[in-house]
Image (cartoon, rainbow, N blue to C red):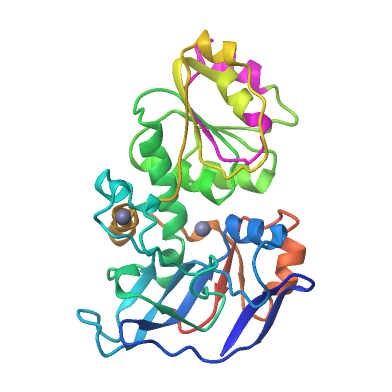
Amino acid sequence: MKAAVFYADKGLVTEDVPMPEPGPDQVLVQVANTGFCGSDHSIIESRDVPDGTILGHEVSGTVVETGKDVEGVQEGLRVIVRPTFCGKCRDCLMGKPYFCQVNRRLIGMQDLPGAFAEYIIVFPQMLIPVPGGVDSRNAALVEAFAASLHGIKCAGKKEGAILVMGAGPIGLALVRLLKLEGFGPITVSEPVEQKRELALLFGADTVVDPFTENLGLHVFKGTDGIGFETVFECSGVVDNVQAGIDFSARGGTVCIVSVMFKPITITPIAMTFKETLLTASYSNTHEENIQVLDWMAEGKLNARPLITDLISLDELPRIYADRIHTGKAVKVMLKIGEEF
Ligand SMILES: [Zn+2]
Ligand SMILES: [Zn+2]
């Protein structure tokens, strides 16, 4: 089968690899679509995975073969794929199964091969069925929305003005879900015009270019000098954490949804004077993925406007260099096998 394979010296290379065969307790899924995630970019640039790794975890597809010990999964089932969890450990029992480390299995992250490939092998527990009325491109975008839904839950706050810093896929998904749940008003800070336009399409009330407009002045005017009740950091720009604290209201919350590896400098007294709650959001649950799928099935949510680049596996190495690494694409979606 065809797959995009990582090599430290060459980056991604699309080539033929052996067809995977499911074990007795595994399932073979034919991949329809796979989204290219920001974390895939981080992994590739870190060069931190072995040669031959197949990345890709934002996948939709169809079950085409089940191992002999697999029960309750039929061939032809349309699915998305999430990591396993044990359901019994301390992390699972506190309702955070994404922390589970008990025999953790996942695709595209140094365990099972990922979905920049025509077929993947997974365990039945990883499958979430895709309801009728949800197409395979929307299904492959569910994880980005589930991560955003999780961010909203981590921030905890329901009322008042909201600032979303950064309108990449996660920031845009956040805007869409905040709107869907009736929260706001929503201000989005984003330097790229195309992303600001998408933010407006997804329901932002105000968009600001932080490079040409004075966001601080805007905050002062837009919130009667109070500041934002909730700030979501989705840009990955380390200085935006302090900016988020500065722009938040007294008693406000700043939630880091982006993935940042670099250290940050913050001024604690800025938090002291406001009793700022600084928190972060990590991963998402099966339930959050199912909630997003339900919204899609009910016609309340169409994620497809996020897709700026619909490409084949053969095009991935070139698009990676031209559109992903350069930050030009919002969401790159691979069209791999038969879509639904
Ligand atoms: Zn992802
Ligand atoms: Zn567990």
Name the residue at the right extreme: 9
Q: In the displayed image of the protein, which residue is found farthest to the top?
A: 273
Name the residue located 24 percent from the left edge and 80 percent from the top edge. 73
Span of residues in magenta: 215-240
Q: Position of residue 246 (x, y in %)?
A: 59, 18
Residue 209 vertical placement versus 243 (above, below): below
Q: Residue at x 71, y 66 (%)?
A: 320
Q: Is residue 83 above or below residue 187?
A: below
Query: On the rendered structure, is 309 left or right of 163?
Result: right
Q: Is residue 130 visible?
A: no
Q: Residue at x 52, y 75 (%)?
A: 113
Q: Is residue 328 above or below residue 279?
A: below
* The N terminus, quarter of image: bottom right
Residue 21 is a magenta residue: no
Quadrant location, the C terminus: bottom left
User: Closer to the camera, 265 or 331?
Assistant: 265
Q: In the rendered image of this protein, does residue 321 appear above or below residue 18? A: above
Of all residues, the one furthest to the left in this rendering is 72
Q: Nearer the viewer, residue 84 or 327?
A: 84
Image coordinates for residue 168, horizontal then vertical, percent: 59, 48
Residue 183, quarter of the rendered image: top left
Residue 107, percent across and down? 47, 69
